[in-house]
C-alpha cells in the first residue's frame, strides 16, 4: 500500500484542511466524489442512520442535497449547498449548510461552511485537498469536536443501554 | 455533552437539561467520561463544574485525531470504491461488445 495518509491541518482559526492521496486517476476520484450513486458508498452515516437523499450537480450553480434518516426522524439531518466555482477535474467549491430535523427553512441550522476540493494527479496517484472554511473559530472548533461526538455515539448507545438496565 | 463542554466549563444541570437527561443520568455519563479522562470535574460549593481535559482551542491533537478518524473511514471506503471503478474501466463496457482494436495491454 502506498503511504497515502490523511493529514488534518488547521492553518487558520476558521479553516480545516484535509489532504489525502488516492491510488487512482483524478478522473475517477472526481467521479467518486461528485456522482450521487458513488457518493452513497463513502458518505458513511453515523451509527443507526441511513443516507436517504443524495443529489449532486458539480457545475457552477449546481446543487448539493444530502439527507440522513434515523429511526426517530426523517430527515434527521440535511446538508444543502451550491457549487460556486468549478474547474472540471481540478477544483470544485461549494457552500454547505447542515440542518437538523428538516431542510433549510424547516429545521435548525447547525452549521455553515464553504468546502473547496482540489485535485492533482501524478503517476496515477491523485492528491486531494479539501479546505473547509467555517464562519467562526467556534464553528470550526465545534466541527472538530463533532468528529469526537460521532466517534463516541456508538459508545454512548451502549452506555445508555447499560444505564437503562436495573443494576 | 462534549460539544457543550468545548464551549467552556459547565455545571451538571447545564449539561443535563439540553439533553433532556435526568440529573442522576448526567452524573453517570460524566463519571464515565471522567474515568476515560475526557472530562474533569471540580466542586465549588454545591456546584460540580465540568470541563474537558484537553482544551480543544490549544491542544487540538486529540480532537483532531477523532475528526481525522471519521474522515479516514470515509476515505477508506473511497479507496475501495476507486479500486472497483479502476477494475470496471479496464473491462469492456459490455461483456458482449466486440472490441476489434485490442484493448488488452500487456502488463508489466
Image (cartoon, helix red, strand yellow):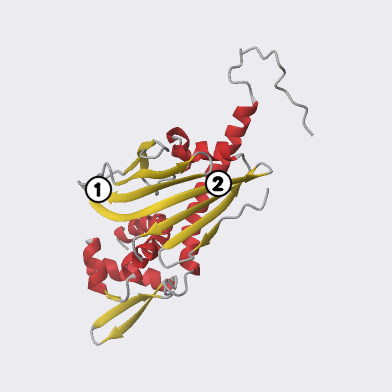
Residue B21 seen from this side: no
Q: Residues within 10 Å of mark 1 (few under 14, many from 20)?
A: many
Task: Name which residue lies at 34% across and 61% down.
Answer: A135
Instruction: Please name the residue that numbered disc 2 is placed on.
Output: A119
Task: Name which residue lies at 51% across and 50% down.
Answer: B73
Residue A123 falls in image quadrant? top right
What chain does badge 2 belong to? A
Tell me which numbered mark, 2 or 1, is placed earlier along the sequence: 1
Mark whose residue sits in front, 2 or 1:
2
What chain does badge 1 belong to? A
Measured as percent of width and height from the top left, residue A134 is found at: 37, 59
Q: Are marks 2 and 1 on the same chain?
A: yes
Looking at the image, residue A14 sits to the left or right of residue A69; the answer is right
Q: Classify mark 2: helix, strand or loop.
A: strand
Seen from the viewer's position, the closer of residues A90 and A51 is A90
Q: Residues within 10 Å of mark 2 (few under 14, many from 20)?
A: many
Q: Is residue B74 above or below residue A148?
A: above
Measured as percent of width and height from the top left, residue B88 is found at: 60, 28
Measured as percent of width and height from the top left, residue A128 is found at: 55, 49
Quadrant in the picture for the C terminus of chain A: bottom left
Q: Which mark is residue A101?
A: 1
The answer to whether the residue labelled 2 contacts the one labelled 1, judged by CB atoms less than 8 Å apart, is no
Q: How many marks?
A: 2
Task: Name which residue lies at 61% across and 39% down.
Answer: A25
Task: Name which residue lies at 53% across and 43% down.
Answer: A90
Amino acid at each position: 500500500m502506498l503511504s497515502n495518509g490523511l493529514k488534518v491541518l488547521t492553518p487558520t482559526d476558521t479553516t480545516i484542511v484535509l489532504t489525502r492521496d488516492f491510488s487512482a486517476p483524478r478522473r475517477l476520484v472526481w467521479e467518486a466524489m461528485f456522482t450521487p450513486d458513488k457518493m452513497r458508498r463513502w458518505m458513511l452515516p453515523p451509527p443507526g442512520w441511513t443516507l436517504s437523499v443524495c443529489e449532486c450537480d458539480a457545475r457552477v450553480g449546481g446543487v448539493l442535497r444530502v439527507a440522513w434518516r434515523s429511526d426517530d426522524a426523517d430527515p434527521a439531518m440535511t446538508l444543502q449547498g451550491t457549487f460556486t466555482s468549478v474547474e472540471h477535474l481540478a477544483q470544485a467549491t461549494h457552500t454547505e449548510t447542515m440542518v437538523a430535523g428538516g431542510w433549510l427553512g424547516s429545521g435548525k441550522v447547525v452549521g455553515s461552511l464553504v468546502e473547496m476540493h482540489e485535485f492533482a494527479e501524478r503517476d496515477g496517484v491523485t492528491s486531494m485537498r479539501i479546505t473547509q472554511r467555517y464562519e467562526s473559530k467556534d464553528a470550526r472548533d465545534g466541527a472538530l469536536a463533532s468528529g469526537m461526538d460521532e466517534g463516541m455515539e456508538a459508545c454512548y448507545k451502549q452506555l445508555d443501554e447499560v444505564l437503562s438496565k436495573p443494576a | 455533552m462534549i460539544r457543550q463542554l468545548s464551549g467552556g466549563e459547565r455545571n451538571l444541570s447545564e449539561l443535563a437539561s439540553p439533553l433532556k437527561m435526568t440529573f442522576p443520568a448526567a452524573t453517570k455519563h460524566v463519571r464515565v467520561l471522567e474515568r476515560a479522562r475526557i472530562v474533569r470535574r471540580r466542586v465549588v460549593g454545591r456546584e460540580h463544574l465540568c470541563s474537558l481535559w484537553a482544551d480543544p482551542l490549544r491542544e487540538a491533537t486529540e480532537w483532531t485525531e477523532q475528526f481525522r478518524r471519521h474522515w479516514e473511514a470515509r476515505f477508506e471506503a473511497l479507496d475501495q470504491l476507486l479500486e472497483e471503478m479502476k477494475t470496471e474501466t479496464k473491462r469492456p463496457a459490455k461483456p458482449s461488445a466486440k472490441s476489434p482494436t485490442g484493448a488488452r495491454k500487456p502488463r508489466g
